[in-house]
Amino acid sequence: MNPLADGTKILNGTYGKAYFDGEWLFNVTSLELNEEIEYEEVPLPSRLTPGQKRNKVTRSGTLTQYRVSRKLEKLIRKSMNDDSPSLVVEIQTEITDPDNPEMSEMTRIIGVQFQRTPGLGYTVGENVTDEIPFLFTDSKPM
C-alpha cells in the first residue's frame, strides 16, 4: 500500500510533549513554531521583474497551556522589571506517534524569549488556558 494513502500514518499531536528546564510541562496543549523568510526586492537591469534577496529570517512560536501553576508567569514577569536581565530559555519538544515511529522527533528550541506574560481571564464552565507567544533564535533536532 502507498504510505501516503494510509490514514494511520498521519502524525497525531496527542503524543506531543514540551520540556522546560528539564521538566515535562504536562499542561502544554499545543506548541507551534513558525519560521518566515523576508525578502527585499532588487531591481535588475533589462528586467521588468525584480530579483529577490533574502534579508532576514524571523522565528516565532506560540505555547498554549492549561493554567495549573504560575511558575512560567512569575519568570516572565520578573524579566519585565527594569533591574532584571532578559529571560532567554530553551524548550525541548518531542512528538511521537505509535502508528508512525519514523516521524518521531525531539527538537531543541533555542533562545526562546516570551513576548507576553499569561494574563488573567476565564470563562465559566471552561478550563483556563494561556496562549504565550515567543520568539526564538534557532531550532535543532536532538
Image: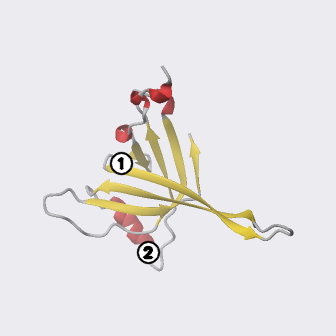
In which quadrant will I find the C terminus? top right
Q: Residue at x 52, y 43 (%)?
A: 107
Give the SS element for disc 2. Answer: loop
Judge by depth and name the residue closer to the eye, 121 or 43: 43
Looking at this view, name the residue that lies furthest to the top. Answer: 1
Query: Given the image, on which type of amino acid does mark 1 rest?
Result: Leu
Image check: 68 left or right of 88?
Answer: left
Q: How many marks?
A: 2
Q: CA gap, disc 2 to disc 1?
A: 23 Å
The residue sitting at 41% across, 71% down in the picture is 78
Residue 101: x and y, percent?
46, 28
Residue wearing tag 2: 80
- The amino acid sitting under disc 2 is Met
x, y percentage for residue 13? 38, 41
**Outermost bottom residue:** 82
Q: Is residue 46 visible?
A: yes
Q: Nearer the viewer, residue 53 or 69?
A: 53
Q: Secondary structure at mark 1?
A: loop
